[in-house]
Image (spheres, helix red, strand yellow):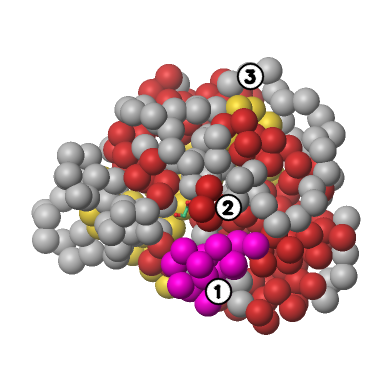
Amino acid sequence: MTLPTPIVLDCDPGHDDAMAILLAAAHPAIELLGITTVSGNGSLEKVTYNAQRICALANITVPIARGANDPMAGKASAAPTIHGATALDGAELPEPTFKLSPLSAVELIADLVRNCDRKVTLIPTGPLTNIAMFLQAHPELHDRIEHISFMGGSTERGNWTPYAEFNIWADPEAADIVLRSGLPLIMSGLNITHQALATSEVLDRISKLDTKLAHTIVDLLKFFADTYRDVFGMPDPPVHDPVALAIIIDITVAKLVSAPVSVELTGELTRGATVVDLHGTTGQKANVDVAMELDVEKFWNMLIDAIAALGA
Ligand code: RIB
Ligand code: CA
């Protein structure tokens, strides 16, 4: 019998991060060891409170630890225009039901990795600050990491600047450390996550589950849809973050290509851009498996089945 894949989810909830938390908690192929938070969609305080509230909503009890408030270079910047003032606007959420871990994100990740009987997969769905700090602080644990499957970057244009995606833009130095780590990396950039659209048909399917959790998720995604329509003119919102986890659950959910990926650190107009060499023009060695095509039906079936499994 195949054991579930042990993971740590490092996130900045955020509507799509919240969906990744639910998928991680519900799917039988995943053992969610813990959640760590990083400022991004909102301040560290807001995204941590949101991680606690999503866990309370779905009766998830795993350790949650606060991580970095600021990027490795510079100051934090939040994305209130997309996720609202709370960083998770759109629905009434319950208050936390348990206290945060006393450990920092880096210490919790180290603890969970050190004590797990299997190699652990890290799933970052926000800026990569915590992950980079963990890799720098614990080189002795690198061989205990199975994959780092991150949502971030893009093989095409950006969403926060013309060429930079928000998670990478928010902490390019951290992304550079992760990309140079030599660990097995899987990148789910905007080029694939923009295929994970929460269409009206998807919302109807979730609504028909007719649980409090399902109705709350629909309300959250409707808020997300409104801001994405207002800010980006997209008719349906891309639910980015669960894609990085879905690939770990079932690698056939996406087509992956191995390619050299680096991050621009000094470009006046392009800082934070991921430079993905899909055609071997740089002569660099491939360091990332880049997700290119999403099996949309398989993805949404996986997510909606997870919401159903959580009941609540
Ligand atoms: O660019 C999309 C990413 O930025 C997603 O992870 C979203 O949650 C925000 O963090
Ligand atoms: Ca996120």
Is 300 above or below relative to 22? below
**Number of marks in picture:** 3
**How many angstroms separate mark 2 from mark 1 (CA)?**
15 Å
How would you rate the neighbour count of disc 3 (Cα within 10 Å): few for under 14, some for 14-19, many for 20 or more? some
Segment colored magenta: 223-237
Residue 97 in sight here: yes
Is tag 1's residue or tag 3's residue first in the polypeptide sequence? 3
Q: Nearer the viewer, residue 81 or 34?
A: 81
Of pointers 3 and 2, the one earlier in the residue sequence: 2
Quadrant holding the C terminus: bottom right
| Pick the front one: 143 or 12 | 12
Q: Which residue lies under the disc numbered 3?
A: 103
Q: Residues within 10 Å of mark 1 (few under 14, many from 20)?
A: some
Q: Is mark 2 within 8 Å of ligand 1?
A: yes
The label shown at residue 264 is none
Q: Quadrant of the N terminus?
A: bottom right
Q: Which residue is the site of mark 1?
A: 236
Q: Does residue 201 appear left or right of residue 132 in this picture? A: right
Near mark 2 (Cα within 10 A), the count class, few <14, some 14-19 or many ≥20, is many
In this rendering, the label closer to the viewer, 3 or 2: 2
Q: CA distance from mark 3 to mark 2?
A: 27 Å
Magenta stretch prevailing secondary structure: helix
Please give the residue where the numbered disc 2 appears in the rendered image: 83
Amino acid bearing label 1: Asp
Query: Is 113 drawn above or below residue 176 in the view shown?
Result: above
Q: Tell me the SS state at disc 3.
A: loop
Disc 1 to disc 3, C-alpha distance:
38 Å
Dot 2 or dot 1: first in sequence order is 2
| CB atoms of marks 3 and 2 within 8 Å | no
Q: Position of residue 70 (x, y in %)?
A: 44, 28
Identify the amino acid type marked 2: His
